[in-house]
Image (cartoon, rainbow, N blue to C red):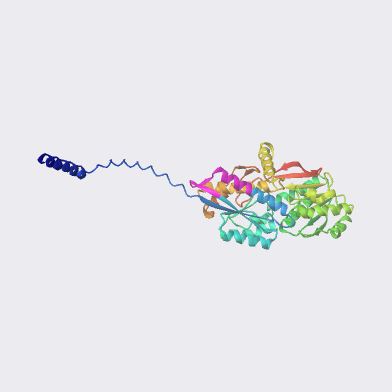
Amino acid sequence: MQMKLKLAVISAAVILAACGKKEEAPAPAPAPAAAPAAPAAPESVVVKIGHVGPTSGAIAHLGKDNENGAKMAIEELNAAGVKIDGKPAKFELLAEDDAADPKQGTAAAQKLIDAKVNGVIGHLNSGTTIPASTLYSQAGIPQISPSATNPKYTRQGFKTTFRMVADDVHLGSTLGKYAIETLKAKNVAVIDDRTAYGQGVADEFEKAVAAAGGKVVGREFTNDKATDFNAILTTLKGKKPDVVFFGGMDAVAGPMLKQMKQLGIKAKFMGGDGICSSELAKLAGDGMADDQVYCAEAGGVEGEEKAGMEKFRADFKAKFGTDVQVYAPYVYDAVKVMAAAMVTANSADPAKYLPALAATSGYKGVTGTVSFDEKGDIKNGALTLMTYRGGARTTLAVIR
C-alpha cells in the first residue's frame, strides 16, 4: 500500500512537471532585407503644339495636308523619347480649323492661347496668318507659318513670328522675270482674288514684269470663293495676253482654267504656290494642257537634300494614303524646329525657348537647311518652278 502511494506521488509529480514545462517556439525567421527604393520616374513635360489651317471649305485639301504633316512630326517626337531639361516630353497636337477666313482664324488663335499652347504652327494663308500673329505676339507665343508668303507677316516688328518659305517678293519677282525672259511673253494679264496672299503675289509679279520689259495689258479681280469668271476673262481675251497670271489658290484656279479653254484663251497660265498643288490637275480637268501652267512652290530642295524629301513623301503617302499637296513637309519641319529650340533652351516655356528658336541656324530638315534671319524669315529661301505634264507636277528648276 505504501509502495503504491509512492508510485502515485511520483507519477503525479512527473505529470505536473510535464504540464508546467513550456514548449519553446521556434525562433522567428529574420525579416528579408528591404530592397533599395526604385528611383522616382522623372515627371514628364507636356508640350502643347497648336496647328491652324483650313480643314473645311474650298481649300480643305491643303489644310488637311498641313495638319497631317504636323501629326507625323508629333508622333515621331513622342516615339523618339525627346527630353527637355532631362524630363521626358509628351507632345500633344491641338488642331483648329480657320476655313481660310480671317475672323475664324483669330477665333482659333484665341482658343489656342486660352488653352495655353507652348507654340503654334500656322496659319496656312497670309490672310489668316497676319491678323492671328498680333494675338500670338501679345500672348508671347512663338508662331511658325509653313506657308504664308505675304511680306507683311514678318515685317510687323513681332519677335514671335517665323516663316518656313520664301516670301511674295521673291516669289512674284521670280515668276514675273520667268514670264518675260523664258516664256517670251510680251503682253501679260493679271487677276487676283483680293486676299492678302493673292493680291500681294500679284503685285510683286506685276512689278517684275514691268522691270523685265513686259507689258501688263489688264488687271482684274475676283474673290477666293468665286466660280464664274466669264466676265473678267472675256474682258482680258480682247487684250490678247500671252500669259494670264492668277494670284490665289488652286480651288479657284482650276475652274478658271476650264473657263479659259471654253472661251478659247490659249495663253499660258501662271500662279504662285497657292495654285501649285497636286490637286490642281483634278480641279482643272480637261482645261489644262501639258506645259500650259507654270507655278512656283515657295521652297525646294536639290542635290543630296532630295533624298530626305523623297523619303518624307513616300512615308506620308504610306501613312495617309494620299500624296503631299504642297506644304506638309514645311509643317513637319516647323514642328521639329520648334521642338529642337525647346531642347536647346531646356524649357518648353515660350518666353524661355523663343530666343533659341530665333537663333535657329543650320537645322537639317526634309525641306532643306533651316535658318532664320532677324525678322524670322527663312534665310536663302528657295523656289521650285514647276509645270504640269500628263496631269502631274514636273519640276523645271530650283531657284534661290
Quarter of the rendering containing residue 20: top left
Q: Residue at x 68, y 37 (%)?
A: 303
**Visible residue check, residue 6:** yes
Whether the magenta-drawn stretch holds residue 36 is answered as: no
The residue most toward the front is: 1
Instruction: Locate residue 27 relative to residue 262 in the image: left or right.
Output: left
Where residue 31 sits in the image (x, y, percent)?
33, 42
Camera-side residue: 42 or 197?
A: 42
Q: Is residue 378 visible?
A: no
Would residue 314 be found to the left or right of residue 343 on screen?
A: right
Image: 99 above or below 361: below
Quarter-wise, where is residue 233 in the image?
Answer: bottom right
Q: Which residues are magenta?
A: 71-90
Q: Is residue 85 magenta?
A: yes
Number of marks in picture:
0
* The C terminus lies in quadrant: top right
Residue in view at x 53 percent, y 55 percent: 351
Image position, residue 134 (x, y; %): 61, 60
- Of residues 360 and 39, the one nearer the viewer is 39
The residue at the far top in this view is 304
Residue 255 percent across, percent down from the top left: 82, 54
Report x, y in % for residue 96. 64, 57
Dividing the image into 4 quarters, which one contains the N terminus?
top left
